[in-house]
Image (spheres, coloured by chain):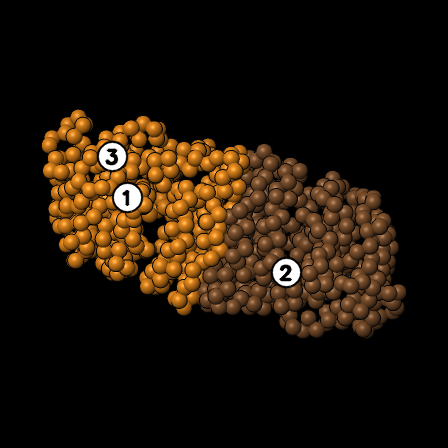
Chain colours: A orange, B brown
Amino acid sequence: MDDRVRQHAEVLVDWSARVDEGDRVVVDVAEGAHDLAVAVAEKLGERGATLLATYGSDEVTRAFLRGHDGEFAGNDPALAMLEAADVHLRLGGGRNTTATADVPAERRRAAKKADQRVREARMDTDWVGTVHPTRSLAQQAGMAYEEYRAFVYDAVLRDWESLADEMANVKDVLDGGSEVRIEAERTDLTMSIEGRTAVNSAASVAYDSHNLPSGEVFTAPHATEGEVFFDVPMTIDATRVRNVWLEFEGGEVVDFAAEQGEDAVAGVLDTDEGARRLGELGVGMNRGIDRFTDSILFDEKMGDTVHLAVGRAYDSCLPEGESGNDSAVHVDMIADVSEDSRLLVDGEVIQRNGTFRWEDGFDG
Amino acid sequence: MDDRVRQHAEVLVDWSARVDEGDRVVVDVAEGAHDLAVAVAEKLGERGATLLATYGSDEVTRAFLRGHDGEFAGNDPALAMLEAADVHLRLGGGRNTTATADVPAERRRAAKKADQRVREARMDTDWVGTVHPTRSLAQQAGMAYEEYRAFVYDAVLRDWESLADEMANVKDVLDGGSEVRIEAERTDLTMSIEGRTAVNSAASVAYDSHNLPSGEVFTAPHATEGEVFFDVPMTIDATRVRNVWLEFEGGEVVDFAAEQGEDAVAGVLDTDEGARRLGELGVGMNRGIDRFTDSILFDEKMGDTVHLAVGRAYDSCLPEGESGNDSAVHVDMIADVSEDSRLLVDGEVIQRNGTFRWEDGFDG
């Protein structure tokens, strides 16, 4: 086994999930993530955890959804399993990123709605999502397989403590501020962050951070007004989406457009009430990620980007006991802010053209 | 997809597990069983069941066990999952039948003991085990891949109702009898079946039968006396075992030998107290299975064979509310009775040299 796979497993189990002796761990294994699952299993054994592996196969999901009439019931075994778990690790990395492309979008959304309690139970665990580099993901990224593997491990095998220190600067500004404004191409958006706490997402549950790799600072905005344009392409429910534009009034999306995949965007926004409100504002700060690869796990963490998600907010940004925006979906959209852009907090420029106020070359 | 895979899934879901709308189904998918999992998922969708797929990977298990120090805790998520399930389907078919060969046997047994509650919870569901034909299983059987696929589907895609009628003859004799005697090479064994009910194992939970393929009649003997020799080779805990001989006194194994793999047999017998007593007597009646393939799922069902298992007895053979022999293991061993053998119930010859009393050519 490639030693990077073992190192990935070690970062995941020790830094990200902080697995201790006796922890009850569920690991979801995508079709192409077998090797990482083996490395993770060895680490979990060494830590004295318990292990239950589930099979996160897109082709199995596709077949089930296509066979089904669309009236989905809750999945009690999945719920009970997660309620009995301390840690949930999702090892992504399939063999075809469009494996569910021929499942009607409405049926996918209905299934997602029926699974909401399961998702919530997962979020009550120390959950972490990562991906094993597969040929399918390399293809989605437009890269050779070995090139893509190097890209993934560069993003994952980092000095996370040092990055956490850098990100603390942004968290401090957001925690002290009450209004964020983003100005860029076709973008002039204001949001309230009053009373919200930013998460220094350093790829560890110890930082309320649940992705490996990570490297973003995010919060849960509300009272959004204005328009925003996302120039980074993405894939929503197996549909390619480009150049999404959203207009907000009174915190809700009142108009939208997309140059490609507009139906997929409409589908997301129509899921439920919360799907038209923002759940997340994130600032990407992982400069180890040096290109867009059409994978939200990496793209939203890239340095010099900002992303917004419609849908569910993470409780970690809210005061204890309060809930933020609620929805069955959480769909991130990304804007490159390396040029012609400003990020302001309470009227003060924090980042301009990708450079932060405390960095060399900042020109407010 | 090969249409036989779809037919296999249909027999499994409809005939074997009798899945109904709303049933909560867990499907365990071995490394090589992906295609069958996809076909099963489609059928489960069509039936309006719920589906949670687990990943039954031997390599993941090996890595976990090798990493672990051997002090295993119960697996709460697995237990909770099964307690919330109506149906459990195990789709065997790995990529290497000796994938766990370098895990110390003691550690495998300790893990098995820790999992006993999980196994019991599985048996409280409508559980069925089957295998998807893989190259690894073809190799274990000494067959070409396509040849092996034909073998598996010949055994699985049968007229199960008609076979159930044939097997009812043997069940009737056993249900009416109180003592079974087996006479063959190095074998003279008597067992009590007083008060026990035989299972007409027609590959369906409706018959208390949990294997696909099946085709055996089995019961839970006790008070075993004498010696028995098993001439069919098998694999126990990844170890090749040949020509096992057991001697019973007062229902317990008091002496044993094996020409190959004796340590594996010793390991089984030492698991716990129940591992030295019989849990099952089975009569193989599936003449669609025309050769031994070193897979207990098929071998024990082959026509003209008898098998005995040390360890756990199935409750279905016991009077309501009573429990039979209890153990963490259930290990089957098989004897070819097509020649020089007699099976007697209460002193009357039921089968001689593989031919039953009610068949042409019977010579009592």
Disc 1 marks a residue whose amino acid type is: Leu
Q: Is residue B188 above or below residue B111?
A: below
Nearer to us: label 1 or label 2: 1
Does residue B143 appear left or right of residue A140 in this picture? right
State the residue at coordinates (64%, 40%): B110
Q: How many marks?
A: 3
Image x and y of residue A220, in percent: 25, 45
Q: CA distance from mark 1 to mark 3?
A: 14 Å
Instruction: Find disc 3 in the rendering and name its residue.
Output: A171
Residue A310, can we see it?
yes
Instruction: Find disc 2 in the rendering and name its residue.
Output: B211
Q: Quadrant of residue B269?
A: top right
Element under disc 2: strand
Could you tell me if the residues under marks 2 and 3 are in contact, i.e. CB atoms within 8 Å? no
State the residue at coordinates (18%, 52%): A251
- The answer to whether dots 2 and 3 both sit on one chain is no
Nearer to us: label 1 or label 3: 1
Disc 2 marks a residue whose amino acid type is: Asn
Could you tell me if the residues under marks 1 and 3 are in contact, i.e. CB atoms within 8 Å? no
Q: Nearer the viewer, residue B336 or A269?
A: A269
State the residue at coordinates (12%, 35%): A348
Q: Nearer the viewer, residue B61 or B324?
A: B324
Residue B62, can we see it?
no
- The label on residue A318 is 1
Disc 3 marks a residue whose amino acid type is: Lys
